[in-house]
Image (cartoon, rainbow, N blue to C red):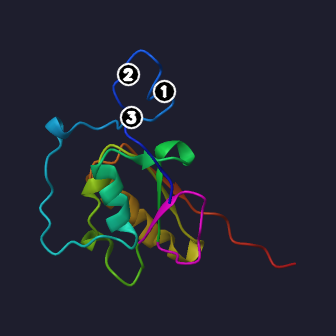
Amino acid sequence: MMFLERETPCRGDGEGAGVLPLTTSKANATPIPYGRQRLPAYGREVEANLRVGRRPAYGGGCVCVTPEWDWRPPLVRLVCPPDIPAGTWRFDFLRGLDVLVFAYPSNAAYAVELRNCLLAAGCRIAALCIPPEAEDE
């Protein structure tokens, strides 16, 4: 996964130019009670990078959430297998980010649940992307 460094204060020589700053502030973030929630697959690395101020370098800083293990977009990805209820995933670390939810049509209902959980966790945008079924010729 590739992340961009946090924007650093400029000393007049252009340092920090072209780096994406974080869009969320810690001052207005409200904690979500964890309870029995757990991180999705690859979530620990993504959360650690976001905590130190790094945003994903590809896709305009958005994160891909998918229930599919074999779906490998060129974005930072989190995998939430459909055999685990969508409400048990912890998405609070994605607060303020744009998220794409990719799923096959067979997991469309679960993808809608994931999208609702992401919006409830404070994601700025949670776009649902489900490709049409391939037609057999």
10 relative to 75, above or below: above
**7 is within the stretch colored magenta:** no
For this view, does 75 lie left or right of residue 78? right
Q: Please state which of residues 81 and 115 is positioned toward the viewer in this rendering.
A: 81
Q: Is residue 85 positioned above or below 93 on the image?
A: below
Q: Main secondary structure of the magenta part?
A: loop
Q: Residue 39 in the image: state x and y as whole percent.
A: 29, 70
Residue located at (34% from left, 36% from top): 23
Q: Nearer the viewer, mark 3 or mark 1?
A: 1
Residues at marks 3 and 1, CA–CA distance in whole angstroms? 10 Å
Residue at which label 2 appears: 10
Residue at the spot of label 1: 17
Q: Nearer the viewer, residue 65 or 47?
A: 47
Residue that label 3 marks = 21
Considering only order in the chain, which callout, 2 or 1, is on the residue closer to the N terminus? 2
Region in magenta: 67-79
User: What kind of element bears circle 3?
Assistant: loop
* Residues under numbered marks 1 and 2 in contact, where contact means CB atoms less than 8 Å apart: yes
Q: How far apart, in angstroms, are the residues tagged by discs 3 and 2?
A: 13 Å
